[in-house]
Image (tube, coloured by chain):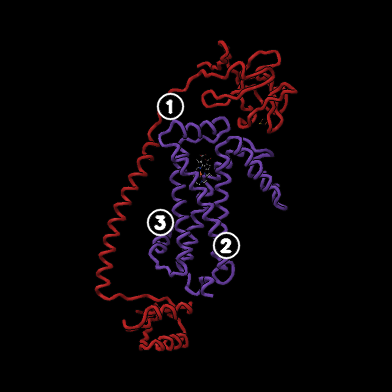
Amino acid sequence: MILVLEPDAPQELVESLCRDVESLGVTCEVSRGPREVIIALPPTVDSVELQKLMEERREVDVIPILTEPEYVRQRGRRKFMRSLLAGLGLLSGVAAGIPVVGFLLPPRKQLSQPNRVLGGRVWQLSRNETKLVRLRGKPVLVINDEFGNYHAVSALCTHMNVCQLEWDPSRRLLACPCHDGAFDVHGNVVAGPPPTPLQTFEVEVQGDEIYISREG
Amino acid sequence: MRSKRHGVRRTLWRAMQQPVSPRQAGMMRFVWLLILLFAVQIVTGILLSLYYQPSPESAYESVVFILRDVSFGWLLRGVHYWSAQLMIALGMLQVIRAFYAGMYKGPGRIHWYIGMLLFLSILAFALTGSLLAWDQTAYWGAVGAMEWVEAIPVVGTMMALVLRGGHQVGAATLGRFYSIHILLLPWITFYLLLAHLWLQSRIRAEQVPMTPKEK
Ligand code: HEM
Ligand code: FES
């Protein structure tokens, strides 16, 4: 067991440490080097007691010295742990590598996205009401206007391409919550900052089913 | 250039090799965990940026594309997202811990300042990153955050203008946040972490704050 101090440790500190150590009934051997001061203690010292004593002294790091059989045992354990770690590391490297390689390969461009979806049923949508559906991942509003005619327009306000329009039944308009933009049922801008009309979609009613589609 | 590189490597090497006293060990475990998560963010972030398009017309669609069409895109985006959440949680724990350890005083308080800057840069990552998905949540989040920036006395209004690139959150904001997120912040964070480790490697035992038990 050795105690290690900063190289500029004052003599009083070293002496008081030695007194502490000698209270445990062992001799205290001090050696001053250029990089640290070392206090060497015989292996018979009670390491638990010593740790306890040194915990109160913030200037000191306690470093245990092993006996030879202990060292051999520890070395074997280290070797085992190292190869275990290497194996696990390799395994997780491969496991993490598979998704990365997959990600880097060029994706099969949107393959099976239909250009036509069921937008709802006639009885789900009374007059002056709308329903939100998705066509190729984009939100589309199906509108049943006050005269019972169906329309379908993109639900994304063209101003920022982020805010989702909502039907305002009293004004009979699509209102944008972000900067008060508004569109009519045909997608034309009637108020606010949006620069362009909304994208429109075809509506077909077959029986009680409403289909939305886009060209191309 | 060469010698600078050498300095970086040496700092990292030293920090990894240095024995850590039990008093410092808890803190350092957190720091290394944060570094690991940051490395994960760099890898997944660079990969995401291959497909992500920072323009209002295509940002949201490019994210949907990553999630749906790119192999393992859902995984890499999920990892980027969750690792970001973990970084914030760890950062908070670390700040609380450093506070209770009294790191803000005494000769080692430079660690506290660097740590706080690191925490701020993590938050800035989260703020700028969360606009990138460009959906309604992201949009309103940024609007709210910018109002919050405006509330800073004296410089707030100008800061908000610079960050937003205008009076409203729009295309310019998306571009700016993207650029900050992937160009500016990674380097700032990298050098802060390096400074943290470098200081750590020269700290002396008596500068480490005492744990309550030791007191
Ligand atoms: C150093 C490199 C980084 C790069 C190159 C990078 C790149 C990106 C890219 C391209 C996106 C957009 C994709 C998406 O929204 O899913 C993104 C999103 C995001 N990033 Fe990063 N990022 C980095 C680090 C970080 C860090 C350190 C944080 C930590 C707090 C972070 C937090 C986020 C968040 C919260 C999002 C939004 C995720 C979402 O909407 O699902 N990023 N990042
Ligand atoms: S986003 Fe709709 S009005 Fe500005």
Q: From the viewer's perspective, is the residue at label 2 or at label 3 nearer?
A: 2
Circle 1 is placed at which residue position?
A: A109
Q: Secondary structure at mark 2?
A: helix
Q: Nearer the viewer, residue A97 or A74?
A: A74
Residues at discs 1 and 2 both on one chain = no
Which chain is home to disc 3?
A: B
The image shows residue B192, relative to residue B40, as above or below, that is below
The residue at the point 46 percent across, 31 percent down is: B68
How far apart are the alpha carbons under marks 2 and 3? 29 Å
**Which amino acid, mark 3?**
Arg
Q: Secondary structure at mark 3?
A: helix
Circle 3 is placed at which residue position?
A: B2
| Label annotation for residue A167 | none
Q: Quadrant of the N terminus of chain B?
A: bottom left
The image shows residue A40, relative to residue A112, as above or below, that is below
- N-terminal of the two: label 2 or label 3? 3
Among the chains pictured, the one given red colouring is A
Residue A77 rendering spot, x and y as whole percentages:
28, 64
Colour of the chain lettered B? purple
Q: Is residue B146 left or right of residue A116?
A: right
Q: Is residue A44 left or right of residue B128?
A: left
| Label annotation for residue B113 | 2
